[in-house]
Image: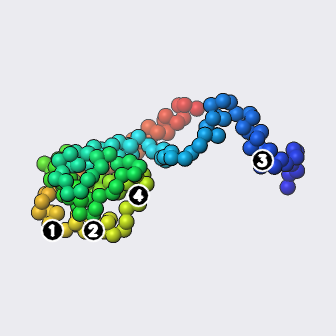
Amino acid sequence: MPCLTAARISDAESAAQRLEEANEETRALMTVSLADTFHYKKLVQPTIRGHDCVKALWALFVATHVETEKLPSEIGPNSAMPTHDTTKEFVRWMGFTLHGCLDKYAVKNTVKVYIRTFFALWRRYAFVPVPAEHRAHVTSFFYSPEFERTSKLSTKSRNKETANLADVEILIKAMLKDIFQNE
């Protein structure tokens, strides 16, 4: 086991030393009060785009919804989560509103992903965990015949070209050629 070269300092001494060594901006960040502040995990750009898409759909739904309850158009801290009945109405609204790239109607899997994203938005931006009962009601509605009658979602998928042995061989040769030329 290697020997330590420097004497160990206490945590209080370490904190004081690091505050002293920090520049003004970092020192301010280290000492500012965190009361009434909200912190979000950093997300990658495609996830943020997905969140923005579902947020825009929610805002459009709220603007056109016949209000039986006061719905927040923006999902954020202190926003009241809608009831499962309102969430089911939102799912139904997405089902007959969204249009698809492959067909006249959206693909069923797309709407399913939007539902999951909608639940994630409440957890992330409003700090409200979606109860299991709420998710169960909405998921049951999504797979119900009532939902299928109101929205004719597509189950089409894009054609995925398959590679044959010659394609794989060409790809491997190109990769190896590129690797050995760069050395």
Q: Nearer the viewer, mark 2 or mark 1?
A: 2
Q: Is residue 33 above or below residue 78?
A: above
Q: Which residue is mark 4?
A: 128
Q: Residues within 10 Å of mark 4 (few under 14, many from 20)?
A: some
Sequence-wise, the earlier of marks 3 and 4 is 3
Disc assigned to residue 12: 3
Q: Nearer the viewer, mark 3 or mark 1?
A: 3
Query: Which residue does the image show at 55% across and 47% down from the upper left?
Result: 35
Identify residue type, mark 1: Pro
**Marks 4/2: CA–CA distance:** 17 Å
Disc assigned to residue 137: 2
Q: Is residue 180 above or below residue 84?
A: above
Query: Which residue does the image show at 32% across and 45% down from the upper left?
Result: 74
Sequence-wise, the earlier of marks 2 and 1 is 2
Task: Note whether residue 149 is visible.
Answer: yes
**Marks 4/1: CA–CA distance:** 30 Å
Image quadrant where one finds the C terminus: top right
Identify residue type, mark 4: Val
Q: Nearer the viewer, mark 2 or mark 3?
A: 3
Q: Is residue 44 above or below residue 119?
A: above
Identify residue type, mark 2: His
Q: Is residue 59 left or right of residue 22?
A: left
Question: What is the x, y in percent for residue 155?
Answer: 20, 57
**Marks 3/1: CA–CA distance:** 64 Å
Asked whether 176 or 106 is in front, the reply is: 106
For the residue labelled by badge 2, is the local secondary structure a helix, a strand or a loop?
helix
**Marks 3/4: CA–CA distance:** 36 Å
For the residue labelled by badge 3, is the local secondary structure a helix, a strand or a loop?
helix
